[in-house]
Image (cartoon, grey):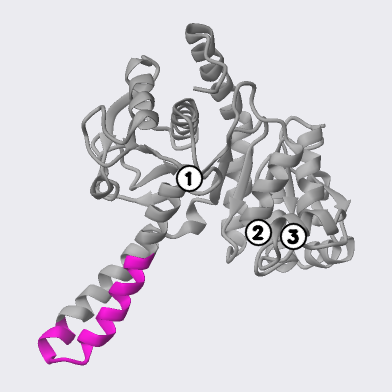
């Protein structure tokens, strides 16, 4: 295998091979990343024929089935052994590729990774991370922070949450290039004993770990205020928080339409607001950030948005390759091993 090769699920996502092939062609031509394109060979050939590319950087792995976005993930994996998502994940697991990228079903990606890719030694639960916009953060020009877990693991132990902090610390430090990322534990109050035994113990673990820039507990209203670079939480809580934010955006659009009909003052104000929202859309465009990393596995796994166009897929490939080159998984593993050596904790606390 070459030093950095990304397995790309060609058939995943709302737009399928047409978009992934445009992205793959651009990456092969403009970067030093090698690609393992997994999917229907005819669709891959048609896509590559439509775009200038470097054939020396591309290898094709045939896979003739597709797991749809609306399929039940486990059923899709079980009944479609030749699915492009499965074959691409298996290639990453076996070492035929350095990392995995797909815009396919989130549930299928999480289950496939758990089924085939070894977890980092000591890690029992994976975390799906997501970026979200915040107010300006001191010492950090990036307007996006990282939250994990947002859905891969529903309930966690205190040790799981500590390991999520290691994951976020490694990813923000190496991918986002944040020096000593600040880390907050999402809780119902700032007091160290809040939230029950699991959260109180997790708070203590993070406070006592000198490798982490832990700022303590944070509350829900702190999330968009940019009080930290990494928010750590259980998957149930993180998923609710993330979708609450998405829902607020939809409500604002609905209220804006209603208010526009009221009077001229509203109309003038909302015209100005619309310009600001367009600028915000440019800032928060997920295509710039590639996708959501699934952390805790021995290979970088990146979930691109289902609606991703070519630029987003290309950026996801670049981020996945960077995660491999910068040894994000290795850094997480070393932090976990150091904690276990110091504490004798086997991951069940």
Q: Does the magenta stretch include residue 279?
A: no
- Label for residue 151? none
Give the structural element (helix, strand or loop) at label 2. loop
State the image quarter where residue 226 is shown: top left
Q: Along the line of sight, which residue is nearer the eye, 37 or 301?
A: 301
Residue 214 higher or lower than 154, as above or below: above
The residue that appears at 45% across and 31% down in the rendered structure is 161
The residue that appears at 37% across and 58% down in the rendered structure is 283
Residue 298 in sight: yes
Q: Is residue 256 magenta?
A: yes
State the image quarter where residue 321 is shown: top right
Residue 227, image x, y percentages:
25, 39
Per the model, the C-alpha gap separating discs 2 and 1 is 17 Å
Magenta stretch: dominant secondary structure: helix
Judge depth for marks 2 and 3 and give the one in front: 2
The residue that appears at 64% across and 42% down in the rendered structure is 301
- Label for residue 235? 1
Q: Which of marks 2 and 3 is nearer the N terminus?
A: 3
Give, as a single range, the part of the protein colored magenta.
247-268
Residue 124 higher or lower than 205, as above or below: below
Quadrant of the frame with the N terminus: top right
Per the model, the C-alpha gap separating discs 1 and 3 is 41 Å
Residue under label 3: 52
Q: Residues within 10 Å of mark 3 (few under 14, many from 20)?
A: few
Judge depth for marks 2 and 1 and give the one in front: 1
Residue 209, image x, y percentages:
38, 16
Residue 2, image x, y percentages:
79, 32
Q: Are marks 2 and 1 in contact (CB under 8 Å)?
A: no
Per the model, the C-alpha gap separating discs 2 and 3 is 29 Å
Horizontal relation, residue 225 to residue 129: left or right: left
Q: How crowded is mark 2: few (under 14 residues within 10 Å), some or many (20 or more)?
A: many
Residue under label 2: 105
């Amino acid at each position: 295998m070459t030093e950095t090769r990304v397995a790309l699920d060609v058939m995943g996502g709302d737009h399928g091979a047409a978009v992934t092939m445009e992205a793959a062609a651009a990456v092969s031509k403009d970067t030093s990343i090698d690609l393992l394109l997994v999917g229907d060979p005819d669709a891959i050939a048609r896509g590559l024929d439509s775009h200038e590319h470097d054939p020396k950087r591309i290898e094709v792995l045939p896979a003739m089935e597709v797991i749809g976005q609306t399929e039940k993930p486990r059923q899709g994996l079980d009944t479609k052994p030749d699915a492009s998502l499965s074959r691409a994940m298996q290639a990453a697991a076996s070492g035929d590729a350095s990392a995995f990228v797909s815009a396919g079903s989130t549930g299928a990606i999480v289950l496939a990774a758990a089924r085939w890719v070894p977890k980092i030694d000591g890690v029992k639960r994976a975390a799906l991370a997501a970026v979200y916009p915040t107010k300006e953060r001191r010492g950090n020009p990036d307007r996006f922070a990282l939250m994990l877990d947002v859905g891969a693991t529903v309930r966690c132990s205190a040790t799981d949450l500590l390991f999520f902090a290691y994951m976020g610390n490694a990813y923000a430090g190496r991918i986002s290039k944040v020096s000593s990322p600040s880390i907050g534990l999402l809780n119902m109050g700032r007091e160290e004993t809040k939230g029950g035994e699991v959260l109180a113990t997790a708070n203590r673990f993070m406070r006592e770990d000198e490798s982490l820039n832990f700022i303590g507990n944070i509350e829900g209203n702190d999330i968009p205020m940019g009080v930290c670079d990494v928010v750590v939480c259980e998957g149930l809580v993180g998923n609710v928080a993330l979708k609450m934010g998405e829902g607020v955006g939809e409500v604002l659009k609905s209220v804006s339409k209603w208010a526009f009909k009221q009077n001229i003052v509203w109309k003038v104000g909302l015209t100005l607001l619309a310009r600001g929202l367009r600028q915000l859309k440019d800032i928060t465009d997920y295509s710039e950030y590639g996708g959501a990393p699934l952390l805790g596995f021995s290979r970088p796994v990146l979930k691109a948005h289902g609606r991703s166009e070519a630029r987003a897929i290309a950026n996801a490939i670049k981020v996945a390759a960077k995660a491999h080159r910068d040894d994000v998984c290795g850094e997480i593993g070393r932090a976990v091993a150091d904690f276990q050596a110091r504490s004798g904790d086997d991951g069940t606390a």
